[in-house]
Image (tube, rainbow, N blue to C red):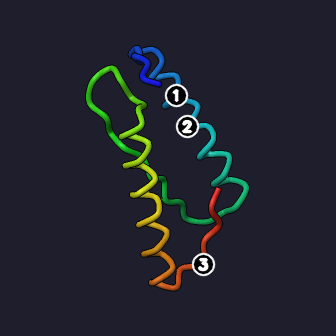
Amino acid sequence: MEQQVTLIDMLDARERRAFHQQKLLTTYQSPMICFTMNIAGPIKNSTLIRKGFELGNRYLKEQLQIAHMDCLYL
């Protein structure tokens, strides 16, 4: 489902993400990788965008496994 996102929505999401990341860093005391996508325009979610994210996320996890990086995925 495609829905337009306002600037306020994006800023609120960024604040929530930063708060959550800070909480994880405090809890786990470990380095963090945050995989995100920068999507131009007001539509931030679609079938194609989700597929691209899933592909990128899968590739990142595969590369971490190849590098024998012991990771906690949240």
Q: Residue at x 27, y 24 (%)?
A: 41
The residue lying toward the viewer, choosing from 24 and 52, is 52
Q: Which residue is mark 1?
A: 13
Q: Are marks 3 and 2 in contact (CB under 8 Å)?
A: no
* Quadrant for the C terminus in the image: bottom right
Give how far apart the Cα atoms at labels 3 and 2 are.
Answer: 23 Å
x and y, in percent, of residue 55 in the image: 41, 57
Please name the amino acid that badge 2 sits on: Arg
Give how far apart the Cα atoms at labels 3 and 1 are.
Answer: 29 Å
> Against 51, is 68 above or below?
below
Q: Which residue is mark 3?
A: 70
Can you name the residue that lies furthest to the right here? 27
Q: Secondary structure at mark 2?
A: helix
Please name the amino acid that badge 3 sits on: Asp
Res 17 label:
2
Dot 3 or dot 1, earlier in sequence: 1
The residue lying toward the viewer, choosing from 13 and 21, is 13
Q: Badge 2: how crowded within 10 Å, few (<14), some, or many (20+)?
A: few
Where is residue 2, by image quadrant?
top left
Q: Residue at x 48, y 53 (%)?
A: 34
Dot 3 or dot 2, earlier in sequence: 2
